[in-house]
Image (cartoon, helix red, strand yellow):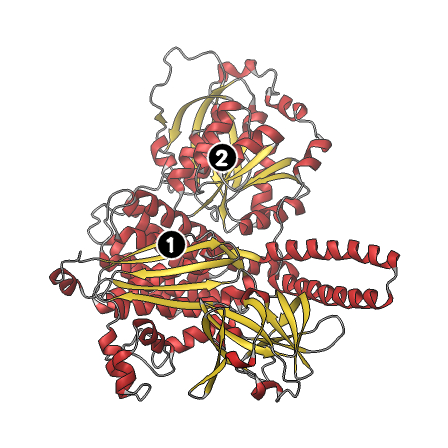
């Protein structure tokens, strides 16, 4: 079970994800509403895993991912994505994201991906 | 069930924000290329799509998806935003808004219009796209006959002595984005060794051009187990691993990769996680805030009551305690007012769309500038302000700003300017709506006034401009020669004025023929708690808002003059209308000479009262709907002793 930082620009998605992850026994150590906040929170909280939305205001998920990976190469980041975002997600994976989950989230899939990324 | 409700609320709230962003960005785009606006629209459409998909609102999801697709193309420079596209997209936002309303009401929206719009958006996306569809591309895992492995480019010719394995990875057919999943697996495997070859080619795998499975050859020291573990995970149904080069089999040592250490190195730090969970902001249902405000109001009323009891009995200790309570109540009251304040943006944000629609309908060109949206106003006033503001804005575009050709002929720029500015001024919030249109023609007003029997021809001829403009607020008075579809039908400025007055505000118009018109709304930031002066008239109490009181004076009998049917009094060299309010309170037998001078909007008058009781803070409650609106009374208040006291509406007196 891991300590997770949730990054998404809507409280709706954060709440949804939080409840899914919580039901899987994970600890939600923080939430961030945009990429810049995500970078700062990562430094502060050093979570085991980050769920990162791709499309966000100010600093987007890819830029935030790069910044986090730059500061901590061992960071585990899962991208939250939706159909239509394949190219962006591939870019994220190539930039060091460890996995991805597709909206609309299905709890078992999310938990499976989180588990598998946490075990690496 | 409860969760569902919470999600729905959050969903509607945040969707509305995104919806608003899309509308405003679309309008911004109409004024020219704006990369930031395109990004905003794309982002908001994407967010809406994700949220609606999560809630299972399929129609909304597909509509947002189509919008997102279009904007992806726009963003890449493959399409440009044409007026037709803007119209189409605005229609989409209208449908989304209707859907959100339905969702808010607990429904599950479906819309046939959405279907049509999705088709139109698709047509727009596809138009002119000559890129071949990808469907025709080969399917790597289809046949049993294993196709040849395709070596990965840049393979190191002096490969190390690591054993080489062949992996065949099968994905769940229901896997979302199998191309991305494949990429994740390839990337993860690469951390354990070097991939020598893949089937089909790596490019095709990364584009998702394979059936349910793909194969690869990897040189790695990690061992079969580790490879299998890394290749498995979400969406993977099967991983077959076999050793490719027999001679390397002996090297199967140390199967535990150093990845294992990472788990050990990530200890739980409970102290820190608790700190992170500290919540800085919460959302509170507005009804609860209203309830709380009611309680604070009750507290204010009861404090007044306690003060009266304390005065009567004169107990020192009690007084002290009461003054402490009093201070806390005041602080609580101020805090509560602060919490209820919301920025005017909430209603301003809708207006650019209104301006655009009206301007388009009328064939006018309007530049709309909004400033001061961060000025705050009590929430309860927002609802009441929305309609009057909408009406004034529509009016300005409809009747104020001239068609482009007319403007040009008059030496003005073709594009009209409409400004909406809000600012805080001492105790009031001031909202100005200024246009540079044709202005109001006093001659037309004169003519209209006589025609409608509101003034005699004589009075009309000599009337000042202010007086004539004041006529605009008379019921049924409108200078527009024809009623249009957009500016309210039969709803005149009198309704606007009444709405503003019910918010305890005032409205003023200034206009210069040919130059433009300015509406000025002056509103108290909140209307619940008011400082009033208590007076007695004919043995009845009456409260007057202190903000309207100029002074209390004594009038001499010989200073009273009759002009026509109204009494006036000469006070400090100015002649003021004098009201006895006998029709409201009955004739007073006392023959008092105490006057309270009132002012509103720069105009003064005075009323005769028997005596002045004092000043106090009270909660003004609006009149019950059963009573209806009562001219001269803006509400009632209950001071400490439980008496019900009317509050004078000074607006209607001066």
Residue B637 locus on image (x, y percent): 66, 73
C-beta proximity under 8 Å, tags 2 and 1: no
Give the total number of marks visible in the rendering: 2
Crowding around mark 1 (Cα neighbors within 10 Å: few <14, some 14 to 19, many 20+) is: many
Crowding around mark 2 (Cα neighbors within 10 Å: few <14, some 14 to 19, many 20+) is: some
- Of B480 and B464, which appears nearest the observer? B464
The structure residue drawn at horizontal position 51% and vertical position 60%, both measured from the top left corner, is: B12
Task: Please say whether residue A120 is visible from this viewpoint.
Answer: no
Query: How far, Cα to Cα, is label 2 from label 1?
Result: 23 Å
Picture quarter containing residue B123?
bottom left
Task: Using the image, determine if residue A84 lies above or below residue B249.
Answer: below
Disc 1, SS: helix
- Of B57 and B461, which appears nearest the observer? B461
Among all residues in the image, which is located at the extreme front?
A: B558
The image's mark for residue A36 is 2
Q: Report whether A74 appears left or right of B454.
A: right
Disc 2, SS: helix
| Callout 1: chain | B
Residue B377 locus on image (x, y percent): 52, 58
Look at mark 1 in the image and give the residue it sits on. B22
The structure residue drawn at horizontal position 47% and vertical position 51%, both measured from the top left corner, is: B374
| Callout 2: chain | A
């Amino acid at each position: 079970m891991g300590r997770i930082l949730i990054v998404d620009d809507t409280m709706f998605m954060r709440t949804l994800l939080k409840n899914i992850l919580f039901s899987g026994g994970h600890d939600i150590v923080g939430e961030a509403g945009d990429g810049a906040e995500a970078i700062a929170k990562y430094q502060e909280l050093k979570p085991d895993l980050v769920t990162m939305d791709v499309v966000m205001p100010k600093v987007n998920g890819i830029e935030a991912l790069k910044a986090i990976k730059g500061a901590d190469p061992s960071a585990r980041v899962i991208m939250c994505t939706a159909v239509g975002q394949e190219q962006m997600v591939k870019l994220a994976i190539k930039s060091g994201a460890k996995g991805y989950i597709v909206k609309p989230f299905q709890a078992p899939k999310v938990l499976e991906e989180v588990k598998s990324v946490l075990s690496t | 069930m409860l969760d569902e409700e919470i999600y729905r609320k959050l969903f509607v709230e945040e969707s509305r924000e995104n919806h608003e962003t899309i509308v405003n960005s679309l309008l911004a785009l109409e004024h020219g290329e704006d990369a930031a606006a395109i990004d905003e629209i794309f982002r908001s459409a994407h967010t809406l799509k994700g949220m609606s998909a999560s809630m299972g609102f399929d129609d909304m999801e597909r509509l947002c998806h189509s919008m997102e697709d279009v904007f992806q193309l726009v963003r890449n420079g493959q399409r440009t935003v044409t007026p037709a596209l803007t119209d189409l997209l605005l229609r989409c936002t209208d449908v989304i808004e209707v859907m959100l309303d339905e969702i808010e009401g607990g429904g599950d929206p479906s819309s046939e219009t959405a279907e049509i719009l999705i088709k139109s958006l698709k047509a727009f996306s596809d138009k002119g796209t000559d890129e071949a569809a990808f469907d025709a591309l080969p399917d790597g895992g289809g046949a049993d006959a294993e196709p040849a492995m395709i070596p990965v480019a840049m393979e190191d010719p002096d490969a190390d002595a690591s054993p080489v394995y062949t992996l065949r990875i099968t994905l769940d057919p229901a896997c979302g984005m199998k191309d991305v999943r494949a990429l994740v697996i390839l990337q993860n495997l690469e951390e354990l060794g070097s991939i020598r070859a893949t089937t089909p080619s790596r490019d095709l795998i990364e584009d998702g051009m394979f059936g349910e499975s793909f194969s690869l050859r990897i040189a790695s020291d990690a061992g079969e187990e580790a490879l299998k573990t890394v290749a498995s995970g979400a969406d993977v149904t099967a991983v077959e691993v076999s050793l490719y080069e027999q001679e390397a089999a002996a090297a199967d040592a140390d199967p535990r990769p150093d990845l294992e250490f990472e788990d050990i190195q990530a200890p739980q730090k409970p102290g820190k996680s608790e700190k992170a969970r500290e919540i800085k902001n919460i959302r509170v249902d507005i009804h609860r805030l209203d309830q709380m405000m009611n309680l604070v109001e009750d507290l204010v009323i009861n404090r007044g009551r306690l003060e009266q009891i304390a005065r009567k009995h004169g107990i020192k200790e009690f007084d002290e305690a009461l003054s402490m309570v009093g201070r806390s109540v005041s602080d609580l009251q101020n805090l509560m007012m602060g919490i209820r304040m919301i920025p005017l943006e909430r209603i301003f944000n809708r207006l650019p769309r209104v301006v655009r629609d009206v301007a388009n309908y009328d064939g006018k060109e309007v530049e709309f500038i909004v400033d001061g949206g961060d000025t705050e106003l009590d929430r309860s006033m927002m609802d009441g302000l929305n309609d009057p503001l909408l009406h004034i804005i529509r009016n300005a575009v409809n009747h104020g700003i001239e068609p482009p050709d007319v403007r040009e002929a008059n030496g003005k720029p073709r594009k009209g300017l409409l400004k909406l500015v809000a600012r805080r001024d001492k105790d009031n919030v001031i909202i100005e709506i200024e246009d540079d249109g044709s202005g109001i023609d006093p001659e037309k007003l004169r003519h209209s006034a006589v025609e409608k029997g509101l003034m005699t021809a004589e009075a009309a001829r000599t009337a000042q401009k202010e007086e004539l403009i004041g006529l605009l607020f008379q019921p049924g008075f409108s200078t527009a020669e024809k009623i249009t579809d957009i500016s309210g039908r039969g709803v005149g400025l009198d309704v606007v004025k009444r709405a503003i007055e019910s918010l305890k505000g005032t409205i003023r118009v200034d206009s210069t023929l040919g130059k433009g018109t300015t509406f000025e709304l002056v509103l108290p930031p909140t209307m619940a708690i008011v400082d009033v002066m208590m007076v007695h008239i004919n043995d009845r109490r009456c409260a007057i808002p202190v903000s309207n009181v100029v002074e209390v004076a004594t009038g001499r009998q010989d200073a009273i003059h009759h002009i026509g049917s109204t009494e006036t009094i000469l006070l400090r060299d100015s002649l003021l209308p004098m009201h006895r309010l006998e029709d409201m309170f009955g004739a007073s037998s006392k023959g008092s000479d105490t006057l309270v001078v009132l002012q509103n909007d720069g105009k003064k008058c005075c009323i005769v009262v028997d005596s002045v009781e004092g000043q106090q803070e009270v909660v003004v409650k609006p009149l019950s709907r059963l009573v209806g609106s009562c001219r001269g009374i803006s509400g009632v208040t209950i001071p400490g002793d439980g008496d019900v006291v009317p509050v004078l509406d000074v607006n209607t007196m001066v």
